[in-house]
Image (cartoon, helix red, strand yellow):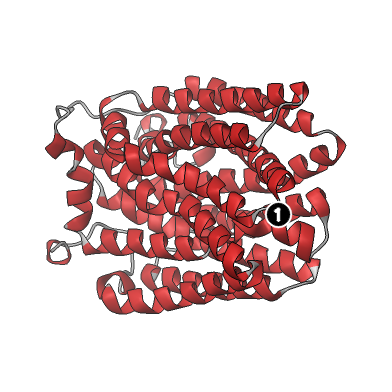
Amino acid sequence: MNTAAAPSLRLIEQRPFVLFWLSRLAATIGSQMLALLIGWQVYALTGSAFDLGLVGLIQFVPAVVLTLLIGHAADRYDRRMIVRTAQSVYALAGLMITVAMVAGVLTRDLLFAAVFMIGCARAFELPTGHSLVPSLVPPKLLSRAVAAWASANQVAVISGPALGGLIYAFNPVIVSVLCTVFFTAGVIFVSFVRPRGQPERREPPTLRSALTGFDFIRQRPRLLGVISLDLFVVLLGGATALLPIYAKDILDSGPIGLGLLRSAPAVGALVTTVLLSHYPIERRIGPAMFASVAIFGVATVVFGLSTWMPLSLVALAVLGASDSVSVVIRFTLVQIETPEDKRGRVSAVNYLFVGSSNTLGDFESGTVAAWLGAVPAVLIGGVGSLVIAAIWMLLFPTLRRIDRYQPAKDSERT
């Protein structure tokens, strides 16, 4: 038997995936550092919780407007090229902020312009990147690859804000310069990625083809349930938009504390995703997903009530750990259910309802905080997450009963 021809089942030996993992790591570190800088600068310039919420809304709008174009582009064109272009736009935004800070002309409107550029680029990059992952590894490694992909995000979310907060306290300009460097590194890494294969058949760019992602999800209750669950939970649980308020006014910890607070969810998530990459959840997947959502809600409530920095950090770490379990399960289910030639359009719809709900959730949290205060806004989000989990268990019983990762039977698709 010729074992040399057998594909390796170790992630570290999948060179295309490793390069893409490094690209995602570099780009996300840059994004997290830049998000910290923008959040602190916006709040320092305006002192407005509503303006912090606007940062999320500005990023949400491109995802809505560009959804159909994003999905069709991801299924028709080189996905590496789309990711590379998006990361180049990130670098341009970082450079623009750097020049404005050096020249002493940084304003709220300029920051919002940079946020809009980032939002447009992210609307293309994230769903395209998600749809590219399955073509970088053998099918048997998909669940582990998803966990490892998530761990790249978590490593970045830990190191990016913590590093950014420390450097910001020394010199804010250095933060924006490093962001640009990290984005450039991401572009270089993704340029060397060679997928295992691309679909040969490309549908013509018709309106019906563009709407395929919506139709595909609508006809599959499990996909509809998992995507809509994430939409409402993240929409209500957007406490991260209010971290500058907690760091400055409630915990009195300054930009260094803000960096720690932004990193804390990723600490819990990183530990969890590393474990999942080695010991994936293979049974009782549905119950595990709903349990993780419930823990997410409880952790959000604890963080909202805390006025002690160590407890706040622990609550955020638990929040991140529970969310990572749910993310890995949801993403794996979506990829398993979707054929390769539709992954771009389905991922674009998934990003519209899931990824963009992060930014819309930031706007919701900022708006509620402007009306009622930061603490009530966070508490409403935590309790709302628990309510949504309970309702979805009743509305989508097939989702609750999922035991293993495998495509739904025909009887479950109508």
State the image coordinates of residue 166 (x, y, percent, origin top left).
82, 42
**Which amino acid type is marked by label 1?**
Pro
Q: Which residue is mark 1?
A: 244
Report the residue at 57% width, 37% height from top: 112
State the image coordinates of residue 20 (x, y, percent, origin top left).
50, 32
- The reply to whether residue 82 is visible in this rendering is yes
User: Can you say whether 351 is above or below 397 in the image?
Assistant: above
- The reply to whether residue 279 is visible in this rendering is no
Tag 1's secondary structure? helix
User: Can you say whether 251 is above or below 21 in the image?
Assistant: below
Report the residue at 28% width, 45% height from top: 346
Report the residue at 33% width, 39% height from top: 65
State the image coordinates of residue 336 (x, y, percent, origin top left).
30, 51
Query: Looking at the figure, which quarter contains the C terminus?
Result: bottom left
**As rendered, which of 278 and 262 lies closer to the eye?**
262
**As rendered, which of 20 and 96 lies closer to the eye?**
96
Query: Looking at the figure, which quarter contains the N terminus?
Result: top left
For label 1, the crowd category at 10 Å Cα-Cα, with few meaning under 14, some 14 to 19 and many 20 or more, is many
**As rendered, which of 104 and 335 lies closer to the eye?**
104
Quarter of the view holding residue 241:
bottom right
Left or right: 19 in relation to 248: left
State the image coordinates of residue 90 (x, y, percent, origin top left).
55, 28
**As rendered, which of 388 and 242 lies closer to the eye?**
242
Quarter of the view holding residue 217:
bottom left
- Count numbered badges in the picture: 1
Report the residue at 31% width, 47% height from top: 349
